[in-house]
Amino acid sequence: MARLEAVCDLELNEQGAMPHDALVAAVAGKHALVSMVTDTVDAAVIEAGADLRVIANAAVGYNNIDVAAAQARGIVVTNTPDVLTDATADFTWGLILGITRRLGEGERLVRSGNWTGWAFDQLLGSSLPGKQLGVIGWGRIGHAVAARAAAFGMSVAHTSRSNAPGSMPLDRLLSTSDIVTLHVPLTGETRHLIDQPALARMKRTAYLINTSRGPVVDEKALAWALRSRLLAGAALDVYEREPAIELELLTLDNVLLAPHLGSATTETRTAMADLAVRNVLAVLAGEPPLTPVP
Ligand code: GLV
């Protein structure tokens, strides 16, 4: 904030997610916008921000921004790659361990006051060694999640849009993996990539993990698959209509639900803020941005 204040007049929204009309009103006359994943920076915002030179999204995903509309007006759009890769990969493993070892159920049992003590066959989960981790999306975060698999004795299969060498076809990855983890950006192509047929392809003993974007999964179809025990479980950090959640998911024990915390460590959020600020300062100084989106 101090570094921005040194060169700009700052208007700060401290109210959490900003209503769209408030955002439209606020961008008028501004030269830079630092946006969050909860800000929909659509054509209306971009049109209202006629003086904008840079939109710095404090996130790696930028599906909340109409990049084409911004670029058509010569506005630079930046994101925060790299600095959040490890935090998000670590959190993904937190979810993998949490769902396979039934951590949510265990915690609910303890908090309910109904835990009667240790029992040999209580809340038995599923072990990871010897199993296959299927990584969908072979970018920075997908790679980092895969790099941690050896520590848990898992083999890795991956699929990528470009079908690069080593990539497994999606259908085969879905039908052979024990854990399927999503690391694709949200685009027209990936919306509902995991739909009812995709879920039906997965092993009944498999788990689905999503730390990417909610709409990559058809949440109603996922609730159906979990209810029908077509999957062993799912762990989600993101949702189709955040903060709303498909209500049935709240009633199912075989799903672990986190409130979009993938990159939420003090160190990582500080690094993301720092990168967003450096991008703003660079563009306002007439220099190239550090991490422009393509
Ligand atoms: C968070 O969801 C991000 O894209 O950084």
Image (spheres, rainbow, N blue to C red):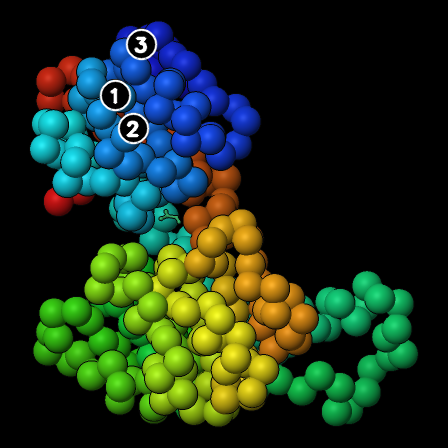
Compared across the picture, whether 274 is left or right of 207 comes to left
Q: Quadrant of residue 280?
A: top left
Could you tell me how far apart the alpha carbons at marks 2 and 3 are, in whole angstroms? 20 Å
Give the mark toward the camera: 3 or 1.
Answer: 1
Dot label at residue 8: 3
Compared across the picture, whether 169 is left or right of 33 comes to left
Dot label at residue 115: none
In the rendered image, which residue does mark 2 sit on? 45
Q: Residues within 10 Å of mark 3 (few under 14, many from 20)?
A: some
The residue shown at (46%, 31%) is: 19
Q: Is residue 54 visible?
A: yes
Q: Amino acid at mark 1?
A: Gly
Badge 3 marks a residue whose secondary structure is: loop
Residue 182 percent location from the top left of the image: 35, 68
Return the residue nearer the eye: 121 or 216.
Answer: 216
The residue shown at (41%, 26%) is: 21
The residue shown at (35%, 64%) is: 216
Q: Is residue 8 above or below residue 34?
A: above
Badge 1 marks a residue whose secondary structure is: loop
Residue 165 percent location from the top left of the image: 10, 78
Give the mark toward the camera: 2 or 3.
Answer: 2
In the rendered image, which residue does mark 1 sit on? 49
Q: Is residue 83 above or below residue 200?
A: above
Could you tell me how far apart the alpha carbons at marks 2 and 1 are, in whole angstroms? 6 Å
Q: Amino acid at mark 2?
A: Val
Q: Amino acid at mark 3?
A: Cys
Q: Residues within 10 Å of mark 1 (few under 14, many from 20)?
A: many
Residue 167 percent location from the top left of the image: 17, 79
Q: Is residue 127 visible?
A: no
